[in-house]
């Protein structure tokens, strides 16, 4: 699952490249999209804005039409100059929006649909999203309330639940809980509002910092950073570091697969001590 900062940066780069420009070409391999585009042509409309809502990317065209895409696990958007060679095979193209100066290609984007503003307002998946960590206005109390409502759920799972808070993926989940000093399998019910609020603050801070400092390109290869280290080999505290020594205390970083899709969770057993409640899991 991509992290919210990836989608946010993609939206920002696409907005800079496309907004205000007229669409000269629109293609998709999805019949539902091409059918709508035949009835209500995209070519000739201008791109009004590109924005992110949680992990949804929304490209708004003039005349009340919005292209919603969701990357799921493997989707990505690339930007190319018209004559440039694509970095992915053409067969992976799912949707393409071009203007005179730039081509935006959605590769392996599994979810793509064209909606009116009215459809968008009624959209079940979008309506169910919790507050967006990267939104300009962010309701921290609402997120804390939604977290508390998850009761016995492990805090690690609650952070990934996009209905509680939108934007956190598996990497940030482990890093945020390390920075908060909280064991990932602690039930949210044993954490007080202050502890939950602190986790939310760290989450917002980390996502925002990664949006700001990472390169302006759409390349996912630029390393995320949650440590303050300038060493490119020590950008993360615990994620992907199972069996290695904790950068803070030297204890061995633990990892465990959880959930239906067996995502790995990483933590330091000393910096993030288990409570009696998290031990029982
Ligand atoms: Zn440690």
Image (cartoon, rainbow, N blue to C red):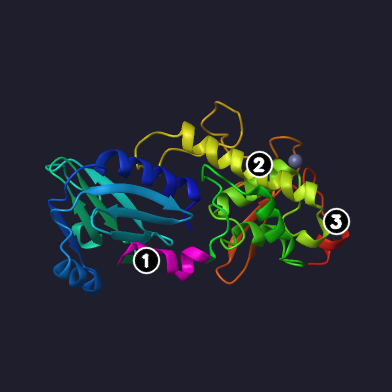
Mark 1 and mark 2: Cα distance apart in space: 35 Å
Residue 242 to residue 149: above or below:
above
Secondary structure of the residue carrying tag 2 is helix
Q: Earlier in the sequence, mark 3 or mark 2?
A: 2
Secondary structure found at label 3: loop
Q: What x and y, as percent, mark residue 27?
A: 17, 61
Residue at 42 percent across and 38 percent down: it is 222
Specify start and end residues of the magenta stretch as a single range. Answer: 114-127
Label 3 Cα neighbours within 10 Å, binned few <14 / some 14-19 / many ≥20: some
CB of mark 3 near ligand 1 (< 8 Å): no
The label shown at residue 211 is none
Earlier residue among tags 1 and 2: 1
Circle on res. 275: 3
Question: What is the magenta segment's predominant secondary structure?
Answer: helix
First in sequence: mark 3 vs mark 1: 1
* Mark 3 touches mark 1? (CB < 8 Å): no
Rendered image: mark on residue 202: 2
Give me the C-alpha separation between circle 3 and circle 1: 47 Å
- The image quadrant of residue 68 is bottom left
Q: How many marks?
A: 3
């Amino acid at each position: 699952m991509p992290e919210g900062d990836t989608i946010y940066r993609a939206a920002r780069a696409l907005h800079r490249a496309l907004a205000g420009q007229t669409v000269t070409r629109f293609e998709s391999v999805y019949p539902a999209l091409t059918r709508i585009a035949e009835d209500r042509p995209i070519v000739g409309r201008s791109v009004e804005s590109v924005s992110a809502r949680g992990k949804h990317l929304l490209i708004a065209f003039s005349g009340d039409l919005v292209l919603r895409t969701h990357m799921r696990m493997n989707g990505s958007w690339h930007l190319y100059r018209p004559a440039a060679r694509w970095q992915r095979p053409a067969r992976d193209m799912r949707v393409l929006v071009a203007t005179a100066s730039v081509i935006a290609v959605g590769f392996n984007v599994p979810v793509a649909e064209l909606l009116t503003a009215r459809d968008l307002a009624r959209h079940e998946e979008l309506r169910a999203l919790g507050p967006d960590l990267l939104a300009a206005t962010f309701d921290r109390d609402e997120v804390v309330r939604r977290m508390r409502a998850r009761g016995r759920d492990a805090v690690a799972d609650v952070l990934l639940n996009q209905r509680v808070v939108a934007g956190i993926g598996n990497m940030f989940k482990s890093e945020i809980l390390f920075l908060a000093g909280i064991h990932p399998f602690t039930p949210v019910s044993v954490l007080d509002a202050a502890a939950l609020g602190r986790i939310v603050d760290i989450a917002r801070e980390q996502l925002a910092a990664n949006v700001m400092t990472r390169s302006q390109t759409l390349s996912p290869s630029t390393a995320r950073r949650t440590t303050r280290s300038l060493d490119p080999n020590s950008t993360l505290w615990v994620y992907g570091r199972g069996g290695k020594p904790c950068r803070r205390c030297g204890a061995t970083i633990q990892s465990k697969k959880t959930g239906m899709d067996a995502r790995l969770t990483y933590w330091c057993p000393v910096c993030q001590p288990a409570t009696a409640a998290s031990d029982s899991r």
